[in-house]
Image (cartoon, rainbow, N blue to C red):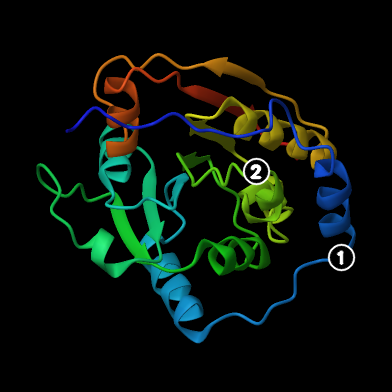
């Protein structure tokens, strides 16, 4: 059956009590894992394709890329890069023609984010849509805001938008950003109007689940 997605089940009812400790440790001990050569090559090709002339919009972990496609149409005056580590997902069919302001990149965002920071690139907009919430209490370090690379995210600036079907996830992400750069955002219940940005957003909505969104302007972070 289609609309049968189960809601996130977790013993956590609010942000993890170890979140602040973990985020600040990652802030104070920068992530120095060497870049994978293929990620560096993909980054250089992406920067060349962008050219720096248009504001840059990044769709991190874009999956099959439907969100990137819609964002490119929604923001025709931006250059949109959809990044995912799965070649299979990126090659799946997309509805409609490919906009000229859209580029798909096969890369790991763990390296891609750091390479952007190293190149002093500032984003105009950044989307993190429906990441794996890793809802078990012992999985905090697997969530993006618990990963050692996360301090790179506020450094990229721009308007960051995260959507999830687990409120705790976006509450934790908001807390992590506040700890790292003092920027605060409002976690709100998100009611989809019009075309959902991702297949997950459509399935969660049609399954009757509540969706949540965080929008934070990191321009001065």
Q: Residue at x 77, y 37 (%)?
A: 16
Name the image quarter holding the C terminus: top right
Looking at the picture, how far across and down is residue 191, in whole percent?
A: 40, 13
Seen in the picture, residue 178 relative to 154 is either above or below; the reply is: above
Q: Would you name the residue on which mark 1 appears?
A: 29
In the picture, the disc for residue 44 is none
Tag 1 near tag 2, CB within 8 Å: no
* Total numbered circles: 2
Q: Secondary structure at mark 2?
A: loop
Which of the two labelled residues, at mark 1 and mark 2, occupies the earlier sequence position? 1
Q: Nearest the camera: 72 or 82? A: 82
Residue 219 visible in image: no
Mark 1 and mark 2: Cα distance apart in space: 21 Å
Q: Is residue 9 left or right of residue 105?
A: right
- Kindly indicate the quadrant of the structure image that contains residue 32: bottom right
Camera-side residue: 145 or 123? 145
**Rendered location of residue 27, percent (x, y):** 84, 55
Can residue 136 be seen?
Answer: yes
* Location of residue 91 with respect to 191 vertically, above or below: below
Q: Which mark is residue 157?
A: 2
Q: Residue at x 80, y 43 (%)?
A: 19
Residue for point 53% across, 40% down: 124
On the image, the x and y values in percent for residue 99 come to 20, 47
Depth check: give the residue in front, 182 or 61. 61
Going 69% across and 44% down the picture, which residue do you hit? Answer: 137
* In the image, residue 196 above or below residue 219: above
- Left-right relation of 72 to 31: left
Rendering coords of residue 22 (x, y %): 83, 51
Residue at the outermost left position:
96
- Which SS class for mark 1? loop
Circle nearer the viewer, 1 or 2: 1
């Amino acid at each position: 059956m289609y609309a049968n997605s189960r809601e996130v089940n977790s013993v956590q009812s609010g942000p993890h009590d170890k979140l602040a400790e973990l985020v600040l440790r990652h802030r104070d001990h920068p992530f120095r894992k060497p870049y994978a050569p293929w990620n560096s090559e993909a980054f250089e090709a992406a920067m060349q394709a962008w050219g720096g002339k248009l504001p840059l919009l990044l769709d991190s972990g874009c999956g099959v890329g439907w969100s990137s496609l819609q964002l490119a149409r929604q923001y025709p005056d931006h250059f949109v890069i959809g990044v995912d580590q799965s070649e299979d997902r990126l090659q799946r069919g997309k509805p409609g023609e490919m906009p000229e302001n859209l580029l798909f990149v096969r890369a790991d965002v763990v390296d891609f984010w750091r390479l952007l920071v190293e190149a002093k690139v500032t984003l105009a907009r950044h989307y993190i849509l429906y990441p794996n919430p890793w809802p078990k209490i012992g999985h905090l370090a697997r969530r993006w805001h618990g990963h050692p690379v996360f301090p790179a995210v506020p450094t990229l600036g721009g308007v960051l938008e995260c959507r999830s079907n687990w409120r705790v996830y976006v509450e934790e992400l908001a807390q992590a950003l506040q700890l790292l750069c003092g920027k605060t955002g409002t976690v709100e219940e998100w009611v989809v109007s019009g075309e959902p940005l991702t297949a997950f957003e459509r399935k969660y909505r049609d399954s009757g689940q509540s969706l949540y969104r965080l929008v934070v302007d990191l321009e001065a972070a």
